[in-house]
Each structure stands twice: as structure tokens, then as C-alpha cells.
Amino acid sequence: MELIHSGKVRDVYADGDDLILVASDRVSVYDVVLPTPIPDKGKILTRLSLWWFERLADIIPNHVISADDVPDEWRGRAIRCRRLTMLPVEWIARGYLAGLGLKEYDKSGTVSGVALPPGLVEASKLPEPIFTPTTKAAEGHDEFITYDDVVAEIGADTAERLRQTTLEVYRRGAELAAERGIVIADTKLEFGRAPDGTLVLADEVLTPDSSRFWPADEWRPGRAQHSLDKQFVRDWSSTLDWDRTPPGPEIPQEVVDATRARYIEVYERLTGERWTG
């Protein structure tokens, strides 16, 4: 197999006509990979994505061929996938105001060109979920774009279909998570196109790396929330004298342990399965 791409978290190998997507234990914040891994992180992301792919298959097909037909050394953290032509957009749905969406709202009252009511605060629930795309930067940071920008990039029909699909995936995930006491504040999706033109859900879906998860019984608008996702590492890193450029800081063991515990908690609460590694 040939390594054809190494991302912040995932490595992609070519194996004949297929791809092998391998989720590492690497963690990144502010687009910088930190030198300290989070044990089991890649396995948790892979298993949770597979769980969600099954529950979303009636909405849109996904890229999974097999989670078993992979090299033994990557079993549990790798998926055999279809090759796709990936679309150059980060497809983001938001049901709550947080993160960069909050910063954009505070400046302009909008997020990705979507006007929001006045008076919202951190972690406010939005009147309805909104689609807030960003660029997919090969280097540097992703930037907000508008729906019209997406139309100009990929065409009106594809843009509208995937906007609706992004919101439908978010609503399905948020409803299921709410039954398990978890708020999904927002999520990022990626889509590609198969050789026959079919639009396909790819990469990961509704994981602690691609979504904000909050315990529902602790949700209080107007303040930072208790996170069950990568935000915990971002918050720790923001306390440091670090300019957010490489090399990133080593993560203390207590932060590693607390991060791993959050990933396991959200996996167990969503799936109802005990994490056994």
C-alpha cells in the first residue's frame, strides 16, 4: 500500500481501487498537531463513525466498504473506503451558538451570511439549525463562506442537496443524542462524489473531533459549557503562553487522561456500549 495523504489525524493509503483510512491518536488544536497522543482516540473515532454511518445510511450513502478487511496492525482504527472526489467545502450545521460561530455573530449578527436574532449569548439554542459552510484550507485556517459562495464553487443543485443533507444529518444526530442526555451543538461533515456521480458522506461523522458535545443536564446559556469533545484540549492550550504555531506544547498527563475519559464517555452514552478498547 502507498501512503497518499497524512492529515492532522488520519492517514490515507491506496490499496488497489480502494483507500484505507487510518485514524491515529494524534490531536490537533488551531490546526497544529500536538506532540502528545490521546490513547485509543483513533479507535473511538472510527468505531463511533461506523455506528453513525449505519444510522444515517437512509439519508445518504457513505464511503465504507469494510472495517474488517484492513491490515491487522490497524484493526479497530481503519476503514476500507471507496475512492471519492472530495468537495472543497466544510459542511457545518449549527443548532447552538459557540466557537467561531459565536465570534462571527458578535461581530456582525450573522454566521456565514445567515442572519440571527439579536441578543443571543454563548451556547444559546438557535431558533432552528443553520448551515454555515467554511473553506477547506490545505494550509492555514478555514474561513467562513456563504451559501452563495458554495453555489458558485460546486453548482446550485449540488449545493442545495448537500445543504439539506447536512441539516438532516445534524437533526437526526441531535435528536438521537438528546435521548441519551447529550446536546450536539454543531457538527462538521465532508462529502465526496463517486465515479458514477453519486454524492457520498465521507471521512468521519458526529465524533468528538468533528462536533461539540455537551451534557444536556449541565447546559446553561451565557457561559462556556462542559465539553465532551476536543474543546477540552483547546481550552487547556488557551491558558498557555503559546502563539498557536508549530511546534505545539506537550500535553500534561492529567489533560491526556481527562480528554480520553471524555471521548469514552460520549461513545458509551451515545452507543449504549461499554468501551473495551
Image: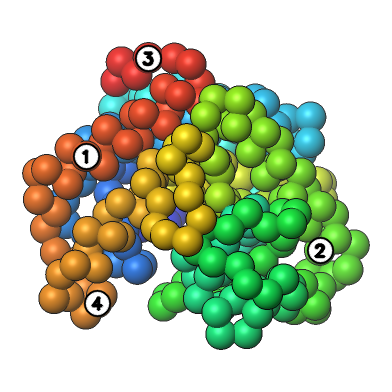
Quadrant location, the C terminus: top left
The image shows residue 28, relative to residue 264, as above or below, that is below
Of labels 1 and 2, earlier in sequence is: 2
The image shows residue 20, relative to residue 131, as above or below, that is above
Quickly name the residue at label 1: 258
Q: As drawn, is 29 to the left or to the right of 58?
A: left
Quickly name the residue at label 4: 245
Q: As drawn, is 29 to the left or to the right of 202?
A: left
* Residue drawn at (29%, 27%) of the image: 73
Examine the rendering and report whether any part of residue 155 can be seen. yes
Q: Which residue lies most toward the bottom here?
A: 107
> How is the structure coloured here?
rainbow
Image x and y of residue 131, in percent:
71, 61
Q: As drawn, is 240 to the left or to the right of 188?
A: left
Q: From the viewer's perspective, is the residue at label 3 or at label 4 nearer?
A: 3
Q: Amino acid at mark 3?
A: Arg
Quickly name the residue at label 2: 159
Q: Amino acid at mark 4?
A: Thr
Q: How far apart, in angstroms, are the residues tagged by discs 3 and 4? A: 37 Å
Q: Which residue lies most toward the right here?
A: 157
Quickly name the residue at label 3: 274
Instruction: For mark 2, give the secondary structure.
Output: helix
* Residue drawn at (11%, 43%) of the image: 254
- Mark sitting on residue 240: none
